[in-house]
């Protein structure tokens, strides 16, 4: 999902209303869903088409919407090279079979947007019967940076003064993170890992049925259970959004000690159950399938390192939630 803006807030802004307890009024929701980017028919989608044919520059109607919601008129569609396409297809081929099946049936496209803010984004779209589909946007800058550099940029943005590095090896490009993280969001939208990825899709596809659920270590979408919480979690700000960063580099060790005692695989995972589900899958795949390290290192007078997927808490949750994904007999 987008790294700096919650999609429910965007829906509320687009409709010109607050996310009231009862949800958006039917006519306002209908107006929002009538926009071209919210309709499957706008994407010339063929579920029988190979995924390779769905990789390319962002459609103009979706690009216009992204420019508007991000206030970024400079966004441009990007045509990936043959080598970049091959890399993405290799990453998709290594995903669990049930995810590949879901992508074949419901993934409208993997689109590339130059100068996109953040690593990527995914969002839901409804067909005429109300069935949920999704698309995925990739920032092509992820082809040029290593996986370690990509994750370091995110992690360092939390602290005043930086001083944080993430080591995920040197073998893979940053696009690995985008495909894994956003890909799990796509799967969550169309098949369901969590009760819902965001409240807006519940109003649109289910008439609000199921809102107010809890999931795993979460009391609600953005509120973890008390035993899962940790100090500084409420102060986490990524990529300079919401006035961040707000945590001193000198407090980074305290933050990560809290993370290591929590059930979360990363600081970003603690922001919502949707991000938690995506991060658990991402780091499970990186460490268990791609066999890469995942170490957070702090510089300074007291260097320290942390390995969240070896804490026991996060790793056990990842195996419980996603171990079955990799079993051929449980492809569906």
Image: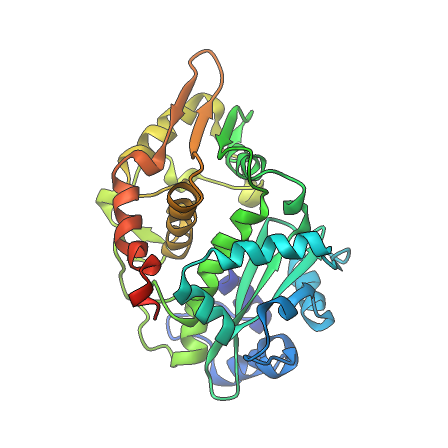
145 to the left or right of 246: right
Residue sitting farthest toward the bottom: 129
Q: Nearer the viewer, residue 45 or 273?
A: 45
Residue sitting farthest toward the front: 328
Where on the picture, by quarter, is residue 65? bottom right
Q: Residue at x 58, y 35 (%)?
A: 149
Q: Nearer the viewer, residue 211 or 83?
A: 83
Q: Residue at x 57, y 66 (%)?
A: 13
Residue sitting farthest toward the top: 301
Q: Residue at x 45, y 21 (%)?
A: 250
Q: Nearer the viewer, residue 196 or 211?
A: 196
Indicate the position of residue 31 as horizontal and vertical percent values. Answer: 58, 82
Asked if 289 appears above or below 31 in the picture, the reply is above
36 to the left or right of 291: right
Where on the picture, by quarter, is residue 316? top left
Res 1 visible: no
Where on the picture, by quarter, is residue 157? top right
Indicate the position of residue 103 as horizontal and vertical percent values. Answer: 49, 69
Asked if 292 appears above or below 103 in the picture, the reply is above
Q: Residue at x 63, y 79 (%)?
A: 35
Indicate the position of residue 36 as horizontal and vertical percent values. Answer: 65, 79
Q: Quadrant of the C terminus?
A: bottom left
Residue sitting farthest toward the left: 227
323 to the left or right of 135: left
Q: Nearer the viewer, residue 52 or 112?
A: 52
Indicate the position of residue 209 as horizontal and vertical percent values. Answer: 33, 77
Tally of marks: 0
Asked if 229 appears above or below 43 in the picture, the reply is above
Tell me how the rendering is colored: rainbow
Res 127 visible: yes
């Amino acid at each position: 999902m987008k790294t700096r803006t919650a999609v429910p807030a965007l829906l509320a802004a687009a409709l010109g209303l607050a996310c009231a307890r009862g949800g958006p009024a039917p006519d306002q929701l209908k107006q929002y869903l009538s926009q071209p980017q919210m309709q499957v028919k706008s994407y010339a989608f063929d579920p029988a088409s190979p995924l390779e044919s769905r990789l390319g520059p962002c459609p103009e109607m979706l690009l216009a919407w992204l420019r508007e919601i991000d206030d970024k008129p400079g966004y441009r569609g990007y045509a990936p090279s043959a080598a970049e396409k091959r890399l993405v297809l290799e990453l998709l081929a290594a995903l669990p079979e049930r995810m590949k099946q879901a992508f074949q049936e419901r993934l409208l496209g993997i689109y590339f947007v130059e100068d996109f803010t953040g690593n990527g984004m995914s969002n839901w779209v409804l067909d005429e019967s109300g069935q949920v589909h999704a698309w995925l946007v990739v920032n092509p800058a992820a082809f040029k940076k290593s996986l370690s550099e990509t994750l370091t940029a995110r992690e360092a943005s939390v602290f005043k003064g930086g001083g944080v590095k993430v080591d995920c090896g040197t073998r893979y490009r940053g696009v690995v993170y985008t495909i894994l993280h956003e890909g799990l969001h796509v799967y969550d939208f169309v098949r369901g890992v969590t009760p819902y990825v965001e409240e807006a899709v519940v109003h649109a596809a289910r008439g609000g049925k199921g809102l107010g659920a809890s999931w795993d270590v979460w009391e609600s979408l953005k509120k973890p259970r008390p035993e899962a919480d940790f100090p500084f979690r409420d102060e986490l700000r990524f990529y300079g959004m919401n006035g961040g960063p707000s945590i001193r580099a000198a407090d980074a060790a305290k933050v990560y000690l809290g993370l290591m005692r929590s059930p979360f695989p990363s600081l970003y995972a603690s922001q919502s159950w949707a991000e938690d589900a995506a991060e658990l899958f991402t780091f499970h795949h990186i460490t268990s399938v791609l066999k890469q390290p995942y170490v957070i290192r702090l510089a300074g007078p007291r260097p320290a390192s942390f390995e969240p997927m070896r804490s026991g808490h996060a790793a056990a949750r990842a195996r419980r939630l996603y171990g079955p994904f990799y079993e051929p007999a449980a492809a569906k």
